[in-house]
Amino acid sequence: MDDLQYLIWAGLAAAMVGLSKGGLPTVGMLSVPILSLFMSPVKAVVMLLPIYIISDMVGLWLYRKNFSAINLKILVPAGVGGVLVGWLTASLVSDTAVKMMIGVMGVGFVLNAWRKRNTTQAPRSANWRKGLLWGSLSGFTSFISHAGGPPFQVYLLPQQLPKLVFAGTSTLFFAVINLAKLGPYHQLQPYGPHELTGALVLIPFALVGTVVGAYLTRKIADDWFFKWVQVGLLLVSLKLILDVVRA
């Protein structure tokens, strides 16, 4: 792939990462599939991690006052544990199995939510047992393919948190998870000058995406925000299942 093609497609992938870090969930999950059209999925995952981390720094500042502390206390240790499991089992678990598992869970959750859309659902409280389960699964799938969004959303969406609190909790959680992945990724596929240079040129795309994502998150009405979260979750989940079927 020539430099212009790389800049266009990798820049789009980086902008997707930035939009997700700005508060638009599930958008970032499109980044790895986009880059995987032009390079191996493993290389795409490793290439994008520095972009995720830099975008996280901006997201942390944007949502520094909007997050659920109790949920982070549950999810962060579980997520880091999931990253560790992903690292230790990297040679044993196939991308295909993980994609199918994530896809089926995401579709099932959205269909169940839509089935109950005309009934009044009381907000659920933070739950240690469920949080440890979904948090660890989110960390594991994030390590495998930056696809930790669906398990995280399956746990957090039923709590019906305020829009900015939901976005901020997601941003802070994945900021910690991405930092936890840096060492294992480098051990599995060391970063060289080529990878670092390729990531460096994508930083402006990611930063612009983060700011735009935060702006849109604040402008979109709460009801529509969570509807789009569910639609995005469904589309990404179906895409993962389709990838498995095609393979």
Image (cartoon, rainbow, N blue to C red):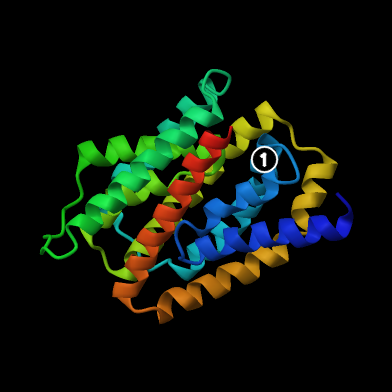
**Front-lying residue, 214 or 67:** 214
Percent of width and height locating residue 167: 39, 63
Percent of width and height locating residue 104: 37, 39
**Front-lying residue, 55 or 30:** 30
Residue 84 sits above or below residue 27 on the image: above
Q: Quadrant of the C terminus?
A: top right
| Crowd tier of the residue under label 1, counting other residues whose Cα lies within 10 Å: few below 14, some 14–19, many 20 or above | many
Residue 11 lies in what quarter of the image?
Answer: bottom right
Identified at 77% across, 62% down, the residue is 8
User: Is residue 79 in view?
Assistant: no
Identified at 35% across, 59% down, the residue is 230
Q: How many marks?
A: 1
Give left or right: position of 29 versus 15: left
Identified at 23% across, 39% down, the residue is 130
Residue furthest to the top in view is 92
User: Is residue 241 in view?
Assistant: yes
Residue furthest to the right in view is 2
| SS of the residue under disc 1 | helix
Residue 90 sits above or below residue 28 on the image: above
Identified at 59% across, 61% down, the residue is 16
Percent of width and height locating residue 97: 48, 28
Percent of width and height locating residue 18: 58, 63
Amino acid, disc 1? Val
Give left or right: position of 43 versus 69: right
Residue 8 sits above or below residue 246 on the image: below
Residue annotated with mark 1: 46
Give left or right: position of 44 versus 82: right
